[in-house]
């Protein structure tokens, strides 16, 4: 990934704010046994990372859509950084991505895709901080490769920066960060907003469009 300039700028001002309450948080459905145990040890929080239901869905759908061709995907995590009782945590509210140059083992933003990325960032519609990045390892499980660690060290080197890795083929997700120059896992919770339906972690389903002519002709609803 080669776009450090979009991450430049000043440190975010970290305000005090309560994290999403435990009744609006849950573990991601794709955590492996170890990650699920880490989640349980940290529950009910505060966690260092909260992923909105919306961001979760976009990351999962992005990775799943490219999984058929075994292509990696990536994007930026947009959110805010807050503090609660001494814990600094990131709230990922949305994600942004663009056209990619990717194979099954590497990915980067395409050079021609930067304008689209800036448009996606402008469209975020809130005063975001880039709190990390996500990328997929289709069929390779979730870990931080030497290249991923280098990316983290060079570009996402703030303590609130996270790396979400998702494997849409094995249905696995994990999150990492750097601490004292070493990678460690960073348990996270999926949260939903008040009055939003809870997160159940359904698999991605192709939905038929209501105006699909075949659908109308078949008379099914
Ligand atoms: Zn990777």
Image (tube, rainbow, N blue to C red):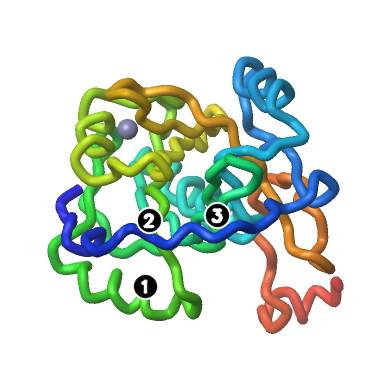
Task: Report which quarter residue 112 is drawn in.
Answer: bottom left
- Residue behind mark 1: 121
Position in image of residue 99 (x %, y %) = 28, 62
| 140 vs 67: above or below | above
Task: From the top left corner, tell me how far across and down residue 122 is, in percent.
Answer: 37, 79
Q: Dot 3: few (<14), some (14–19), or many (≥20) neighbours within 10 Å?
A: many
In contact (CB < 8 Å): disc 1 and disc 3: no
Q: Quadrant of ligand 1?
A: top left
Q: Is 207 on the left or on the right of 71, as rendered? A: right
The relative height of residue 64 versus residue 119 in the rendered view (above or below) is above
First in residue order: circle 1 vs circle 3: 3
User: How far apart, in angstroms, are the residues tagged by discs 3 and 2?
Assistant: 18 Å
Q: Which mark is residue 76?
A: 2
Q: Which numbered disc covers residue 82?
A: 3
Q: For label 1, count other residues whose C-alpha is less than 10 Å away and answer few (under 14), some (14-19) or many (20+).
A: many
Q: In the drawing, does residue 52 fall left or right of residue 121?
A: right
Give the spatial CA distance, label 1 vs label 3: 21 Å
- Badge 2 element: strand
Precedes in sequence: disc 3 or disc 2? 2
Residue drawn at x 21%, y 52% as measured from the top left: 101
Percent position of residue 73, x then y: 36, 48
Mark 2 touches mark 1? (CB < 8 Å): yes
As helix, strand or loop, the secondary structure at mark 3 comes to strand
At x 51% / y 31%, what residue is drawn?
186
Q: Nearer the viewer, mark 3 or mark 2?
A: 3
As drawn, the label of residue 101 is none
Closest to the camera, between mark 1 and mark 3, is 3
Residue at 22 percent of width and 67 percent of height? 113
N-terminal-most mark, 2 or 1: 2
Left or right: residue 177 versus residue 37 is: left
């Amino acid at each position: 990934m080669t776009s450090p300039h979009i991450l430049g700028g000043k440190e975010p001002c970290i305000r005090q704010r309560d994290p999403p309450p435990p009744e609006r948080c849950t573990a991601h459905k794709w955590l492996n046994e170890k990650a699920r145990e880490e989640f349980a040890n940290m529950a009910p929080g505060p966690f260092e990372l909260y992923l909105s239901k919306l961001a979760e869905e976009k990351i999962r759908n992005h990775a799943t859509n490219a999984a058929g061709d075994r292509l990696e995907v990536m994007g930026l995590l947009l959110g805010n950084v807050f503090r609660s009782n001494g814990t600094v945590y990131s709230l990922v509210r949305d994600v942004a991505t663009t056209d990619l140059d990717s194979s099954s083992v590497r990915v980067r933003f395409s050079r021609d895709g930067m304008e689209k990325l800036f448009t996606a960032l402008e469209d975020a519609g809130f005063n975001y901080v880039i709190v990390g990045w996500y990328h997929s390892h289709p069929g390779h499980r979730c870990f931080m490769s030497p290249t991923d660690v280098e990316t983290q060290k060079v570009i996402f080197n703030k303590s609130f920066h996270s790396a979400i890795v998702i494997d849409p083929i094995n249905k696995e997700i994990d999150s990492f960060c750097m601490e004292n120059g070493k990678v460690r896992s960073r348990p996270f919770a999926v949260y939903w907003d008040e009055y939003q339906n809870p997160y159940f972690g359904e698999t991605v389903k192709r939905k038929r469009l209501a105006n699909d002519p075949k659908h109308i002709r078949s008379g099914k609803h």
